[in-house]
Amino acid sequence: MKKRLLWITVLALFAILLCGCQNKSKVNLSETEEKKDNDYIYLYDEKDVSPVSDFQFKEEKDGGVTVIRYKGKDTKVVIPETYNGKKVTEIGGGAFYRTTAESVVLSRYIKKVGGQAFYGSESLKSITFSPNLEIIEYEAFTKCTALKEASLPGSLKEIGYMSFNGCTSLKYIFIPKSITVWESGCTFYQSGLEKIDLEEGITELGYMAFAATQIKSISIPGSLKTVPDGLVARCDKLEKITIGEGVETIGNGAFIKTAITELIIPASVKKINDSAIYANEKLEKVTFLGDAPEQFVDDEFNFETAQGGGNYTVYYQKNAKGFTTPRWNGYLAAPVGSKPQPQVEGDFEYVINADGTVTIAYYRGSATEVVIPGQIGGKKVTAIGKNAFAYNETVASVKLPDTLTEIGYGAFSLCYDLSTVNLPEGLKSIGEYAFNMCSLTAISFPASLTKVGANAFSNCQEITYLRIPATLTDIGEYAFSGIGYTNKGWSKGEFELVLDEGIEVIGKWFFATTMESVVLPSTVKRLEEGAFSGCDYLTSITLNEGLVSIGDLAFEGCSSLTEIVIPSTVTEVSVLSFHQCPKLKAVKFEGNAPASFWKKHPEGDDVRPAYDVYRHQEATGFHSDDFDWFDIQIW
């Protein structure tokens, strides 16, 4: 008991010293067991507690009280601790919306600040949170442009979307480790923050939490296993980023468009790609302290139009695994303490392979029309290396040599102006993302080609004609997804797809185009998962007799499809094959019912389909429970 009295006395003396007048201020921590953070100072003057009549309250069923609206006109507001003998525990949504108050103190029992509670309160300069506050909801302080003081207590568990967005006068914030839920993100987006301290032990931060602020440095504790996407994106004054050992993943766009010149990646980081550090014009050096990440180049990322991998050099430890020199993923690379020494002829950096052939490692030029030689130094050029032309902003056409057998991962990815390329006879393999997001208008595959990697031609929106030869037997997921959409917008385009006889499998997530009709060759046996998913304008598809299996989501989102006929040879097809086809009115079976037709969506979506099922008079299997939800018609 004596120790407790001594502690209260010390706190009281401290309050007197801070306020400069004896017997005037109160340290409102009378129930010390509720205090969550011993460093959080919570002081206010008892005489300043606002009258109950200035508020509209709501008594909740749980015994607490919510402030519904502030009706007063005072510039200084201290919320009462109780109302009708009950504790005030919450500030309701919009309660202080555009208030003229300049300072607000939340009484000690308040645990929640509701959505948009202080939204647009341009006069608010100071907010003092309860030491027991647990939740700040979405946009609670958005556009409080005069707000300078907002210390987050160690009791805080959850913080909402854009809760301090646009607080341009807020210069400093300390983020306690107690916050484990960041709703959506953009918490301090476009605020005036110049300094951020993250408490050691913090485990969560939100998407774009500090994006577009004025910070000059940030130290990320190793306790934060994942640096979220866009964490400090577009902080154009940010000159130093320190990443603690223990961080394992760095998200997309985490550090884009800053002023950093150097970045050190700790050995604990296992997952990072170059989109994390896009568009850092001053960045010269990225040093890895551990092994190479599994995939460094992100060929899909386009974070709010951020483009370009940068011109920095990658340095790595001499014994590190997974790195190559003089180029690694298209970037100059070398062990720490040395410099990259690429072999160069003309505009091409190259590597001599073990078999004496040459791989083009990087294109240094700026020509619009590029002719790749068939030989360099008397040796055949057989491959275009990983990301060799990636991000090139000038190349419009490329002539490939007849000696070429392989086009590597991302070789021409994000060459937005590339509209013409020949694929020579003898070419055997096109790697993942090889032509992703190029402006190609047509593709003619040679008979020698057997493999096209995942996303190889994804989002080549200008393509109007595509022919798939039977020799092309290995096609990766999303290889042609998003083709046929013109750059005039996501509207109906002119696209023709020709599938040669001999093709047996239409692979996973094969197409998402503007084609209106498809006729499958007689040799097709299987449509895999998502094969024609997202073909918004598909009104007609002719399935071949001989087809055996139609995968889940094969026609998902084919929003113009009104009818489909299932050949008698099909034994595997389910309701999920036609998920989210709103205009589909008839699924007509030529043969008997499949063994299992009803299947619950993995996300729990089991809304009854609007189409009817048609069968022939003699067909069997349509009286099973799988068809209880359907009107069965005879045709």
Image: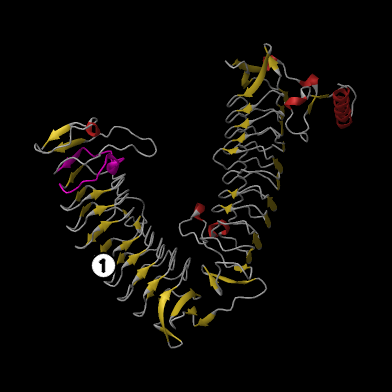
The scheme the figure's colours follow is secondary structure
Magenta residue check for 584: yes
Magenta residue check for 377: no
Hey, which residue is sitting farthest bottom in the picture?
378
Q: Quadrant of residue 93?
A: top right
Q: Residue beneath label 1, please?
A: 471
Q: Quadrant of residue 280?
A: bottom right
Image point (28%, 44%), residue name: 577
In the rendered image, is residue 371 in sight?
Answer: no
Q: Nearer the viewer, residue 399 or 12?
A: 12
Image position, residue 248 (x, y; %): 59, 53
Image position, residue 150 (x, y; %): 71, 36
Image point (72%, 36%), residue name: 151
Q: Please, is residue 310 above or below residue 377 in the view?
A: above
Hey, which residue is sitting farthest top in the picture?
84
Image position, residue 271 (x, y; %): 55, 56
On the rendered structure, is 449 left or right of 95?
left
Image point (59%, 52%), residue name: 233
Q: Quadrant of the N terminus?
A: top right
- Bounds of the magenta segment: 568-589
Q: Nearer the viewer, residue 448 or 398?
A: 448
The amino acid on which the numbered mark 1 sits, given as a three-letter code, is: Thr
**Mark 1 falls on what kind of element?**
loop
In the rendered image, is residue 445 in sight?
Answer: yes
Q: Quadrant of the C terminus?
A: top left
Image position, residue 462 (x, y; %): 34, 60
On the rendered structure, is 309 left or right of 258?
left
Q: Please, is residue 66 above or below residue 448 in the view?
A: above
